[in-house]
Image: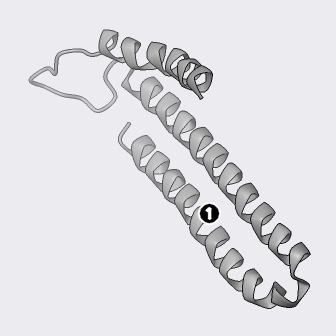
């Protein structure tokens, strides 16, 4: 567990630390596409979609695995397990779709 936390911190630290280096003062006449703002928003949108898709895929995999193990142990309960599993998969997928919508909204602010 400790190794995983150290690896995660090592991966996230450069991302969080370099964000301050790219911060800049807001000018009095702000233009939406000034400087590298469009590039940064495109990178952020792509990163958000990637993380959301990864998290959604892992969540759906675990949900399907648990449901299939439950059905394998008790085949008579397949109908009772299948409906909540499909609802759970739909809710997990909706979170990924929300991330896609947010990415589109970010890209609309260029």
Name the quadrant of the N terminus: top right
Q: Which residue is mark 1?
A: 93
Q: Residue furthest left?
A: 28
Q: Position of residue 54 (x, y in %)?
A: 66, 44
* Side (left or right) of 84 relative to 65: left
Measuring 74% from the left and 89% from the top, which residue is drawn there? 80
* Side (left or right) of 55 relative to 73: left
Camera-nearest residue between 35 and 78:
78
Camera-nearest residue between 6 and 59:
6
Image quadrant where residue 6 sits: top right
Name the quadrant of the C terminus: top left
Q: Position of residue 11 (x, y in %)?
A: 55, 19
Measuring 61% from the left and 20% from the top, which residue is drawn there? 3
Image quadrant where residue 8 sits: top right
Q: Residue furthest top?
A: 21
Measuring 41% from the left and 43% from the top, which residue is drawn there? 106
Q: Position of residue 19 (x, y in %)?
A: 36, 17
Instruction: Mark 1: give few (<14), some (14-19) or many (20+) Cα within 10 Å.
Output: some
Q: Is residue 83 above or below residue 67?
A: below
Q: Position of residue 82 (x, y in %)?
A: 76, 82
* Secondary structure at numbered mark 1: helix
* Side (left or right) of 86 relative to 48: right
Q: Is residue 75 above or below residue 62?
A: below
């Amino acid at each position: 567990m400790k190794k995983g936390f150290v690896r995660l911190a090592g991966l996230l630290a450069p991302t969080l630390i370099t964000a301050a280096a790219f911060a800049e003062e807001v000018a009095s006449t702000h233009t939406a596409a000034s400087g590298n703002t469009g590039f940064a928003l495109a990178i952020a949108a792509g990163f958000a979609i990637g993380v959301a898709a990864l998290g959604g895929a892992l969540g759906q995999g675990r949900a399907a695995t648990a449901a299939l193990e439950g059905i394998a142990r008790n085949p008579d309960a397949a109908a009772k397990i299948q409906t909540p599993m499909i609802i759970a998969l739909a809710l997990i997928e909706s979170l990924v779709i929300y991330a896609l919508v947010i990415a589109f909204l970010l890209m609309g602010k260029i």
